[in-house]
Image (cartoon, rainbow, N blue to C red):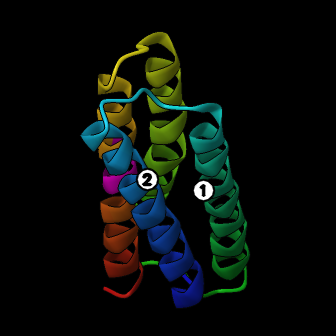
Amino acid sequence: MVLPLVLLVVALCAALTGWAAWFVARDRAVVLKQLWGGAVIEGAIVLQMIVAGVLAATGSSASDPVKLWGYLITALFILPVAAVWAFAERTRWSSVVLAAAAVTVAFLEWRLWQIWNA
């Protein structure tokens, strides 16, 4: 796992969390631009999966590849599920859901880094 890519995903998640928290404080629902922000994070996670696959194919792999890929796949699905939920729930709680999802992905990234370096 490449540290700059992990840090990029965490930074993007932190930015999306802050943006969604600002909407929670202002009692506003999620807007489409925030969902596009989540899509950018998804793209970074897909890039991370490609890099992890290339590193694993060249001999540099995690101590527990099943757990690593489980975390990557889980991280890939959390934001789209939150986006669907946020789109369906047009109250301030949609912003809470998006913020919680972004925080969860950030913590999964931290765990990915730990698994890769174990």
Helix, strand or loop for disc 2: helix
Is residue 100 something that shows in the picture? yes
Please name the residue shown 35% across and 60% down the image.
108
Is 11 left, or right, of 36 in this rendering? left
Cα–Cα gap, marks 2 and 1 = 14 Å
Outermost residue toward the left in this view: 25
Residue 46 position, x and y percent, is 68, 57
Majority SS type along the magenta span: helix
Kindly identify the amino acid type of the residue bearing the numbered disc 1: Ile
Query: Mark 2 or mark 1, which has the lower sequence index?
Result: 2
**Which label sits in the foreground, 2 or 1?**
2
Quadrant of the rendering where the N terminus is positioned: bottom right
Residue at numbered disc 2: 19
Q: Nearer the viewer, residue 32 or 4?
A: 32
Quadrant of the rendering where the C terminus is positioned: bottom left
Q: Nearer the viewer, residue 43 or 94?
A: 94
Q: Which label is found at residue 41?
A: 1
Q: Is residue 83 above or below residue 36?
A: above
Residue 23 position, x and y percent, is 37, 41
Q: Is residue 105 above or below residue 51?
A: above
Range drawn in magenta: 101-105
